[in-house]
Image: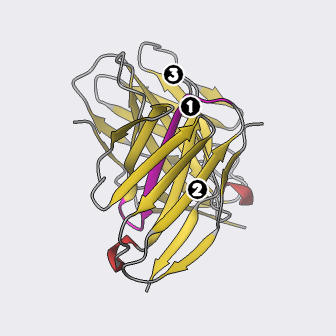
Amino acid sequence: DVKVTQSSRYLVKRTGEKVFLECVQDMDHENMFWYRQDPGLGLRLIYFSYDVKMKEKGDIPEGYSVSREKKERFSLILESASTNQTSMYLCASSPWNQPQHFGDGTRLSIL
Amino acid sequence: AQTVTQSQPEMSVQEAETVTLSCTYDTSESDYYLFWYKQPPSRQMILVIRQEAYKQQNATENRFSVNFQKAAKSFSLKISDSQLGDAAMYFCAYRTDLRGSNYKLTFGKGTLLTVNP
C-alpha cells in the first residue's frame, strides 16, 4: 500500500511565524501535491512538483512556497503565517498518469 | 480552465438503499479522466472510482458505479446497497490527459453523504 505521511495532524502557530508542513511518500512517486481544503470550497491546489527541485504554482500559491530536495519529501512553507491561512492542508503523491494518493491531512490553526 | 460542479452540498440515504451523487464539469478537451474520491471523518481521501473519457463503458467498482455522459459533461456516482461506512464527503475531480500537464486535479466542492440506519 502507498503511504503518504504528513508530519502533524494538528498544528497551532502564531501570526507572523514561519511554518513548515512536511510530507513524505514511500513509493518513489514522481508527482507530489499540496492542497488546501476549506468548507464549501473543496480542495484547491497550492503547489505541485513533478521532480526533485522542480515545482509549479497551483491555483492559490500566494503566501506559500515549497521545497523538494529529495524525491520522497515535499515541504510546504508559510513564510509569514496569517490568520487566513488557518485551514486543512492535504498532501498527495502519484506516479506518472496514475491517481493521486493522499495523506491524513494537517489541521493548521494560526492565532 | 476546467471547472467541476457538485450541485448537492448534502445528501442522505437509508441503509441498503441506492443514492446518486451528481457532478458536472466544463472543459474544451477531449481526453481527460474523471474521479470520485471519498473522505470519511477520519480524513484520509480515498479513490472510489475513475473513468477515462475515451471509454464509453461506465466504470464500476463493486457497489459503486458511474453514469458518464460525455456530451452532457456529466459524471454521477451511484452507490447501491448503501452501508453506514459509506458516510463521508464525496468529491468529484477532473484531470486533463494532455502531455506535460503534470496531472493536477480540479475538484468540486464536495457532497456530504449521510447514511441513516
Q: CA distance from mark 1 to mark 2?
A: 21 Å
Where is B61 relative to A107, above or below? above
Question: Can you name the residue that lies furthest to the right here?
Answer: A1
**Residue at image location 51% in from the left, 72% down from the top:** A108
Magenta highlight range: A28-41
**How crowded is the residue under tag 1: few (<14 C-alpha within 10 Å), some, or many (20+)?**
some
Q: Which residue is mark 1?
A: A99
Q: Look at label 2 and name its amino acid.
A: Glu
- Is B83 in front, or is B111? B111
Q: Which residue is mark 3?
A: A97
Q: CA distance from mark 1 to mark 3?
A: 7 Å
Q: Look at label 3 and name its amino acid.
A: Asn
Which quarter of the rendered picture does the C terminus of chain A lie within? bottom left
| Chain letter, disc 1 residue | A
Circle 2/circle 3 CB separation < 8 Å? no
| Chain letter, disc 3 residue | A
The label nearer to you, 1 versus 2, is 2
Q: Look at label 1 and name its amino acid.
A: Pro
| Chain letter, disc 2 residue | A
Residue A40 belongs to magenta span: yes
**Residue at image location 73% in from the left, 67% down from the top:** B117
- In the image, taking residue A76 as reference, residue A61 lies left or right, namely left
Whole-percent x and y of residue B16? 72, 53
The part of the image, by quadrant, that contains residue B80 is top right
The part of the image, by quadrant, that contains residue B85 is bottom right
- In what element is the residue under mark 1? loop
Mark found first going from the N terminus, 2 or 3: 2
Whole-percent x and y of residue A11? 57, 75
Q: Which residue is mark 2?
A: A22
Question: Can you name the residue that lies furthest to the bottom here?
Answer: A111
